[in-house]
Amino acid sequence: MKKTLITALFTSLYLFSTSQSFSESMFMDYAFSDGTKPSMHIHFSNVRKDALYSALKTAFKSKHGKIEKVKSSSDEYFISHFVLENNKPSKANVKLLEQNSQADLMISFENNESVISEQQAMNDINYYKRFAYDIAAKAANLEYDNQIYVLENTIKKKSKEIKQLEKDIFNKEKKIKDAEHSITRSNSDIVSFKKDIEESSININNTDMNITELNQALRQKSEKKLRKDIKSLEKTNDKLSKSI
């Protein structure tokens, strides 16, 4: 049972990992709090906004960037300074979206020379695309690791439940065996009691017969004595008659 559970859970994990992905980025205009800007849009499947935010912090920290929350907008962030491999001071606007546990990343880049778009900064665009993809990959890996953690805890919990069920089954099987043993012993006692009853019935019959025989013998002795007494009285009576 335990092996079946583990197999089923890891099958779920495999299906989750194979379906977990993010879309090819595309540039589109997006309205941030400080204005509409050309932005990369990456859509995620099976990745939550929390995992995406964690990946975002890690990625920008590795580029010496600090994420600042935009107070006037929910889940919007601004990075005032970071540096990629092109060695150009850069900044970014980020908006995280989520619907039905499916996250979306909107991210706009610009450096000290221009806004990054498919029409401008052609020499630098791949640096920023690669960085955005790195954020997306980190988010997918974080979500995958989180799912492993959840599944491992589920396995532990279910394993404990199975262990308890197996213990309950063992105890109930023991009770059944004890009950069956009691029934067998009771059946044996019943057979023994029936035998005792039969023997007692035979003894009662034998005793009845003995009593009958004794009564007969008693009657015979009483009649014999009575006849003897009568004869004795008759003799006595004859003597008395002769003496008169």
Image (cartoon, helix red, strand yellow):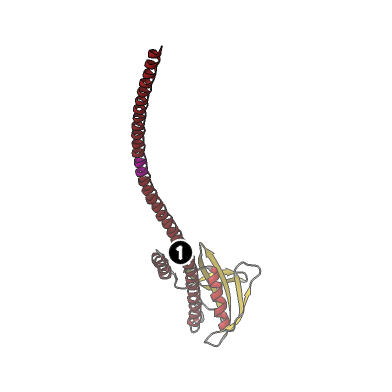
Query: Would you say 4 lies left or right of 31 here?
Result: left
**Quarter of the figure with residue 203:** top left
Instruction: Depth check: give the residue in front, 243 or 181.
Output: 243
- From this view, report whether residue 12 is shown above or below residue 174: below
Q: Quadrant of the C terminus?
A: top left
**Quarter of the figure with residue 207:** top left
Residue at the outermost bottom position:
87
For label 1, the SS is helix
Q: Is residue 26 magenta?
A: no
| Main SS class of the magenta portion in the image | helix
Residue 226, given in percent of the width and then of the height, sits at 37, 23
Residue at the outermost top position:
244
What residue sits right under mark 1 in the picture?
163
**Quarter of the figure with residue 233:** top left
- From this view, report whether residue 167 is shown above or below residue 94: above
For the point 37% across and 51% down, the residue is: 184
